[in-house]
């Protein structure tokens, strides 16, 4: 999800993937699935049924252990993060092999209970963001900024919207003072919500 294709290109080229990389400039996928952060994963089976709604994939709430001055994480937490990625990746593999019989697949009731809430304000925030992107593409940055401010107020939990519409570093990533001020204001609230999966650490356990 990046309005600026060129900002995304270096990261894709560095990863050198063998699969196509799609850039969602208007956050349409984020809007449809009410995603609030990246990375996000959705498990959709071969029949088009969501068996695991949007979740934080193999990432854990590491940001609280990040030192912006040195650009490093606490070493013991890095090992924990690596274990979490392995746990999640292995769960995906188990699903690929066992399908609906995988212990990591939710039944219909549990899947519905894990769907992120889409309130009126959240839906309006997504629509406002996409309108902002439209006028931005038309060259009206001032009006886009006004709309982006509205969408951030309507949906403060969306880090996707926030990072796309606030100050960015030369790398194209919004990890400046404004970003870390918002992170600092979280208090006990997690930056990454926990993943409801056996073996995945929860924010309160870190």
Image (cartoon, rainbow, N blue to C red):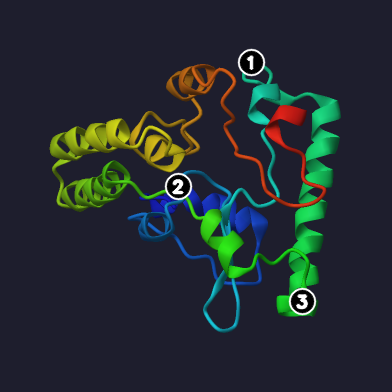
Query: Taking 60 as reference, is 122 left or right?
Result: left
In the rendered view, tell whether residue 24 sits above or below residue 62.
below
Q: Position of residue 142 (x, y in %)?
A: 15, 34
The residue positioned 46% from the left and 33% from the top of the image is 174
For residue 160, the mark is: none
Q: Nearer the viewer, residue 148 or 33?
A: 33
For marks 1 and 3, the one nearer the N-term is 1
Q: Which residue is mark 3?
A: 101
Q: Which residue is mark 1?
A: 69
Q: Nearer the viewer, residue 52 or 141?
A: 52
Query: Taking 129 as reference, is 14 left or right?
Result: right
Query: Taking 18 as reference, is 82 left or right?
Result: right
Q: Position of residue 22 (x, y in %)?
A: 48, 65
User: In which quadrant is the C terminus drawn?
Assistant: top right
Please tell me whether mark 1 or mark 3 is closer to you in this view. 3
Under tag 2, what secondary structure? Answer: helix
Q: Nearer the viewer, residue 172 or 194?
A: 194
Q: Position of residue 88 (x, y in %)?
A: 75, 55
């Amino acid at each position: 999800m990046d309005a600026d294709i060129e900002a995304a290109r270096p990261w894709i080229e560095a990863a050198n993937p063998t699969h196509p990389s799609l850039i969602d400039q208007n956050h349409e996928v984020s809007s449809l699935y009410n995603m609030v952060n990246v990375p996000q994963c959705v498990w959709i089976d071969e029949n088009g049924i969501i068996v695991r709604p949007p979740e934080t994939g193999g990432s854990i709430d590491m940001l609280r252990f990040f030192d912006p001055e040195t650009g490093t994480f606490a070493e013991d937490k890095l090992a924990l993060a690596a274990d979490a990625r392995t746990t999640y990746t292995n769960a995906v593999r188990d699903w690929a092999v066992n399908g609906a019989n995988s212990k990591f697949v939710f039944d219909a009731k549990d899947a519905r209970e894990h769907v992120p809430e889409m309130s009126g304000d959240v839906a309006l925030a997504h629509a406002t963001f996409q309108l902002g992107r439209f006028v931005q593409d038309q060259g009206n940055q001032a009006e886009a900024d006004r709309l982006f401010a509205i969408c951030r107020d309507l949906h403060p939990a969306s880090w996707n919207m926030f990072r796309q519409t606030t100050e960015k570093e030369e790398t194209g990533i919004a990890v400046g003072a404004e970003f870390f001020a918002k992170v600092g204001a979280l208090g006990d609230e997690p930056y990454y919500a926990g993943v409801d999966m056996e073996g995945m650490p929860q924010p309160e356990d870190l």
